Image (tube, rainbow, N blue to C red):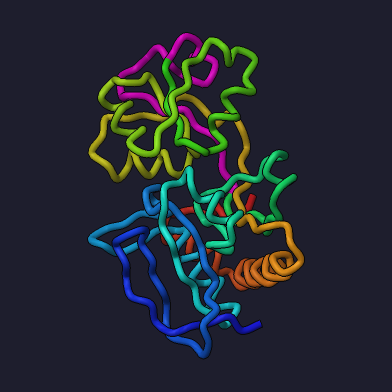
Amino acid sequence: MLRSFGIIPLLLTGGLVLAGAAQANDQPLKVGMSGSYFPFTYVEKDVLKGYEVDVLRAVAEQMDTNVEFVTASFSGLFGMLESGRIDTIANQITITDEREKKYLFTQPYVYDGAQVVVKRGNEEITGVEDLVGKKVAVNLGSNYEQLLRELPYADEITIRTYDSNIEQDTALGRVDAFVMDRVSASQVIKEKPLPLALAGKPFSELRNALPFRDTQADEALRDEVDAALQALRESGRLSEISQQWFGTDISSL
C-alpha cells in the first residue's frame, strides 16, 4: 500500500514534525517519539536524529511511502497513539504482557536489557539488588518503573519518575541511580560529559518493537510495517543501521 505525502516543514511549536521526500498523496506513516532519548531519538540544532529515526526512515522507504515524525513528552505518546494522532511510537517501546493486551506489536527490532546507572565512584550500588533504601529515577511512562515495582524488595526502593534529566540528577547526587536500557546508558556515558557508570549487569531482557492500535485497519498497517522490518533484516540494512550507531548489532539476539 502506498502511503505518502508532500514535504512538511520542520515545526518547533506544539511538537517537532519532520517529513521525508515528497510522494504522491497525503497519507504519511505518522510516528511519535520524544526527541529526548539519546541516542535513539534526540534533537541537535533543530534536527531530529537517532537510531529510531534512521530505522523508521528505512521502513518507510521499504514501504514506498513517507514518514512524519511527531515529538512529544514520552508520557503523552500512548495517549496520542490511542487517539489516532499518530500511527505508532518509535521510542524504545518494550513489549510487556500489559501492553500486549492493548496494542498490536511488530517483531522486535532492538534486543536489550534494563540497566542500573550510578554516579561514578558510587561503590554502594553494584547491581539492582543494592537499590534497597535508595532513590532511583526512571522516565515517566516507561516500563522501567514497572520492572522495579516487580522486584521482591520494591517497597524498599524510592522510585522517582521524570519527564527528562534523570542522567543529570544522578550525576548531581539528587538520586542514587537511574534505570534505562543498557544500550542507551552506555551511549550516554560515552557521549555526554557526566560522571556516570554502569552498575552491574542488565537485570531484565528487553524486546523493543512498534505498537499499533488494536483495530482492523491498524492491524493491516502493522503487518505492512512488520513486513518492511523483516525485509530490512534479511537485507542486512537493520544490522547496518545498528552498527553505524552502536558499533554492534542490537537488532537481533
- Taking 249 as reference, is 170 left or right? left
Above or below, 21 relative to 59: below
Please state the horizontal and vertical placement of residue 61, each as a whole percent of the image.
53, 78
Quarter of the view holding residue 244 = bottom left
Above or below, 70 relative to 173: below
Above or below, 236 relative to 2: above
Which residue is nearer to you in this view: 249 or 146?
A: 146
Please state the horizontal and vertical placement of residue 220, each as a whole percent of the image.
73, 70
Quarter of the view holding residue 81 = bottom right
Above or below, 139 relative to 106: above
**Residue at 40%, 58% in the rendered image:** 50
Which residue is at the far front? 83
Range drawn in magenta: 111-134
**Residue at 29%, 45% in the rendered image:** 191
Please state the horizontal and vertical placement of residue 140, each as a whole percent of the image.
47, 36
**Residue at 72%, 39% in the rendered image:** 97
Q: Quadrant of the N terminus?
A: bottom right
On whether residue 81 falls in the magenta region, the answer is no
